[in-house]
Image: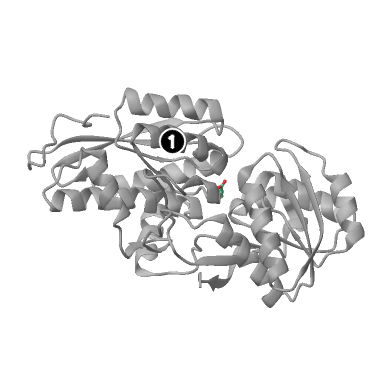
Amino acid sequence: PSSGGEGGGGDSAGGTINIGLLMPLTGQISQFGEQTRNGAMLALKQRNNKVGNYTINAVVEDDKNDETEAVARVQKLVTEDQVIAVIGSVSSRISIPVSEVLEQQGVIQISPTSTADALTPGKKWIFRACFNDSFQGKVMAKFAREELNAQTAAILYDLANPYSEGLYKSFEAAFTDLGGQVVKVESYRTGDQDFRAQLTSIAGANPDVLFLPDYYNPVGLIAQQAREVGVQATLLGADGWDDSQLYDLGGEAILGGYFSNHYSVEQENPESKAFVEAYRQEYGEDPSALAALGYDAANLLLDAIQRVIDNGGDPTDPEQVRDALEQTQGFKGVTGTISFDENHNPVKDAVVLQTTANGHKYVTTVSPQ
Ligand code: PHE
């Protein structure tokens, strides 16, 4: 694509740089989309939509968490709005096809939240602000073995969602590696409402823990039905559990479970403290991990643009911004300190949270070794 504005050329005259925000603002995970957008918009607002003399113009698009819609929206962002970068999408199932378009077009993508391993490897233009599912699955397997002393595990996952499937595989491999035994694996498809058959089979295997790698809506239902058919296991999950609706949907059945996440409001560092205050003031609620990652993703991009300008480059040239982004070192984000590995994955910590009657409670932090 050509430059995003009338400026460019590396002078100090400035200009406009268009960036895209691609999020599921309607549909099954619209909560996730709104929070991620709010986080990213706050980052822009705090800089008055400016980096140096350049105005950053954010174009927001709703991908409806639908693949076809997402690809159409992203093509519009590239051809009509001539964005140099897209922040999005939220779920891995959408971010992966979007990455194929952007990789081909030579436009930067930073997914705030998509954790599926397959998103970034082998791609020049694609980055993420979150850790990946290999790490996340390992975190929960280790927690189950070492903190909960679990000997046996069962897994129930969505075979139509690469996020869910990837987590199932990484949890299973790590749990087995650490000397545990996976005694039952069952599956379903996105949109299913009745999990009783699979859960009855899991109840028969009587596992110590049941890993449920999916978003809050199916997980809430699954938790209820699991208790109904006699599953006693401690429930475990991952970042997809992070929404207060988990408690509305799961009721008592979801309490006492554990899940891995990108961030906890209870774990303060100077960056996160200032962020939490600003977010509360702007939106009247606590930021979720998605909001924090949306904020970090936007700031990673703005920081790279700033460095291009500082070095006398042209920040309307996506290639220069991409190179700067790749060279990010020790970026102090709300969700941790970010440098990218060779696959454009940040190397950073995860937290484990417990589901309690008073909401999520911070339990521990796990670092990659
Ligand atoms: N990690 C999920 C995915 O890749 C998205 C997600 C991130 C959901 C953070 C909730 C919280 O599909």
Q: Nearer the viewer, residue 288 or 77?
A: 77
* Residue 24 in sight here: no
> Residue 124: x and y, percent?
37, 45
Q: Nearer the viewer, residue 96 or 241?
A: 96
Q: Residue at point 51% right, 39% down? A: 96
* Residue 360 in sight here: yes
**Left or right: where does residue 264 sit relative to residue 178?**
left
Amino acid on which the number 1 mark rests in the picture: Leu
> Residue 338: x and y, percent?
38, 62
What colouring style does the render use? one colour
> Residue 166: x and y, percent?
63, 51
Q: Residue at point 44% right, 63% down? A: 347
Instruction: Please tell me whether residue 195 is drawn above or below residue 333 in the rendered image.
Output: above
User: Circle 1 — which element?
Assistant: strand
Q: Would you say the beta carbon of the disc 1 residue lies within 8 angstroms of ligand 1? A: no
Q: Nearer the viewer, residue 225 or 175?
A: 175
How many C-alpha atoms fall within 10 Å of the one at disc 1: few (<14), some, or many (≥20)? many
Tell me the quarter of the image containing the N terminus.
Answer: top left
**Left or right: where does residue 108 sit relative to residue 200?**
left
> Residue 77: x and y, percent?
36, 28
Q: Which residue is disc 1 drawn over?
A: 22
Q: Residue at point 42% right, 59% down? A: 346
Q: Residue furthest front?
A: 122
- In which quadrant of the rendered view does residue 366 lie? bottom right
